[in-house]
Amino acid sequence: MSYHRIVKSVQSSSHVFLSAAAACVLSLGSAPAHADDYDATLKDIQSTMGGVPSFVKQFPKTGLPGAWAEVKAIELSDKTALPPKVKSLISLAVAAQIPCTYCIWSDTQDAKRAGATDEEIEEAVAMAALTRHWSTIFNGMQVDFDTFKKEMGGQ
């Protein structure tokens, strides 16, 4: 998939940006804000997405350059191990568990634009539910982890 097509598919994906931005802010700590970096980031977002979503301007200026760099390097890049459809389906499955209405809507749109069928979207969400279900069982019943690994074919 071309970079241009990936960028088109992410134009409504504000939730991933928010998640990545939050993680980046935590890693930046108290890095000083540089107006030039912030302004350059806004210009790059404008160029890449065809506009700057309003929530971007609510995001802390100190974290925006790093957060945007992370989004571009992982979600928007066509040089990653996972294709856009898989990334969207993973993000949708996580969003369904959080839950995040913004993310669910956006990831569903992105997955469809990336070629996911309704059946693939439904299965991704069902897998998230299945994983959550069994995690609840294992953790709530305090299943011994070493025994679990041994019984499931591990060492």
Image: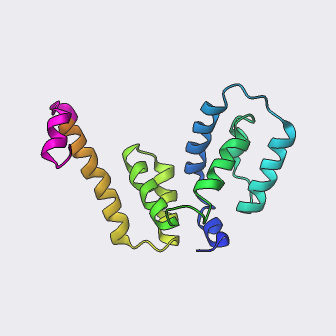
Q: Which one is in front, 36 or 12?
A: 36
Seen in the picture, residue 66 relative to 141 is either above or below; the reply is below
Asked whether 129 or 26 is in front, the reply is 26
Residue 58: which quarter of the image?
top right
Instruction: Give the left or right position of residue 104, taking residue 134 as reference.
Output: right
- Viewer-nearest residue: 58 or 46: 46
Q: Is residue 8 left or right of residue 92?
A: right
Query: Who's the residue at 22% across and 33% down the image?
Result: 139
| Percent position of residue 29, x then y | 66, 27
Q: Residue at x 49, y 59 (%)?
A: 107
Residue 149 among those drawn in magenta: yes
Find residue 145 and report its horizontal and vertical position in percent: 20, 35
- Percent across and percent down for residue 45 are 74, 55
Q: Is 111 left or right of 128, judged from the image as shown?
A: right
Q: Quadrant of residue 104?
A: bottom left
Outermost residue toward the top in this view: 30
Q: Is residue 48 magenta?
A: no
Magenta span covers which residues?
A: 139-155
Question: Which residue extends farthest front?
Answer: 155
